[in-house]
Every structure is written in structure tokens, then in C-alpha cells.
Amino acid sequence: MPNLTISDAAAGPGAVTQGTKTIVDLSLGSIDAMVDRLYLSRDATNASGGNVETTIILSNGTINANSAILGYQSGPGAGAGVGYCRGVVNVNGTSSFVVNGE
């Protein structure tokens, strides 16, 4: 899979003015994913974006990514209305989170 993006505030048309909070709880299941780029939390591409937060909870399986971006701030800078971006990966049990590059 080329990209896995969760909580992408820049994906839709128009300004995003409210925050986005996503929790992907895989603790009762399993995942085996190989991706080129993993994005957790990407901000809006305008000055009206809110905060973007993403948490993935793993207990079994593997996420293997060539690059992982946990909190991608692509907007116009620290101006008025620009929120923060945060991505968190909780690795528990027998799971693993592998990043091959950056």
C-alpha cells in the first residue's frame, strides 16, 4: 500500500475549522500492514484548521512503514487559527511498529 493516512484535515474541500480526534483501537484484533508512508494527523492547508490528533493502539501484529510521519504540519505556519498535529502509536503485547527510513 503506498500511503496509509489517518486524520487528514487537508483531504476535503474548504476550510477545516474544528478539531479532529481519532482513536484506532486494534487491541482486540490484529494488523499486518506494509506501507510506504504512514501519516497520523495531518493539518489543514489553510489558516482555519483546528487541532488534529490520532492514536493507534496495537496488541498483535505489525505495522511496517518505509517512513512514518506522526503529526504532519503542512499549513501556513504558526499564524492565527493554525492548530497542532499529534500522532501516537501505542505498542503493546506482541505487536511491533517498524520504520525503515525516516
Image (spheres, rainbow, N blue to C red):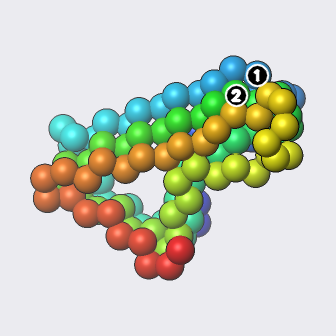
Residue 21 pos. (x, y %)? 52, 28
Which residue is the site of mark 1?
17
Q: Position of residue 33 (x, y in %)?
A: 38, 61
Number of numbered callouts drawn: 2
The residue sitting at the bottom extreme is 101
* Residue lying at the far top of the rendered structure: 18
Residue at 25% from the left image edge and 63% from the top image edge: 96
Q: Are marks 1 and 2 in contact (CB under 8 Å)?
A: yes
Estimate the spatial distance between the alpha carbons at disc 1 and disc 2, rounded to whole Å: 5 Å
Crowding at dot 2, Cα within 10 Å, few <14 / some 14-19 / many 20+, comes out as many
Q: Quadrant of residue 48?
A: top right
Query: Is 40 left, or right, of 95 in this rendering?
Result: right
Crowding at dot 1, Cα within 10 Å, few <14 / some 14-19 / many 20+, comes out as: some
The amino acid on which the numbered mark 1 sits, given as a three-letter code, is Thr
Residue under the point 56% across and 59% down? 69
**Circle on res. 7:** none
Which residue sits at x=51%, y=63%?
68
Residue 82 vs residue 9, the one in the foreground? 82
Q: Is 10 above or below relative to 81?
A: below
Q: Residue furthest left?
A: 93
Please tell me which of labels 1 and 2 falls first in the chain.
1
84 with respect to 79 (left or right): left
Identify residue for label 2: 50
Q: Residue at x 76, y 22 (%)?
A: 17
> Is residue 30 in sight in this rendering?
no
Residue 35 at x, y = what percent? Answer: 48, 66
Q: Position of residue 94 (x, y in %)?
A: 14, 59
Q: What secondary structure is found at the residue carrying circle 2?
A: loop
Residue type indicated by callout 2 = Gly
Q: Is residue 95 visible to the viewer in this orientation of the structure? A: yes
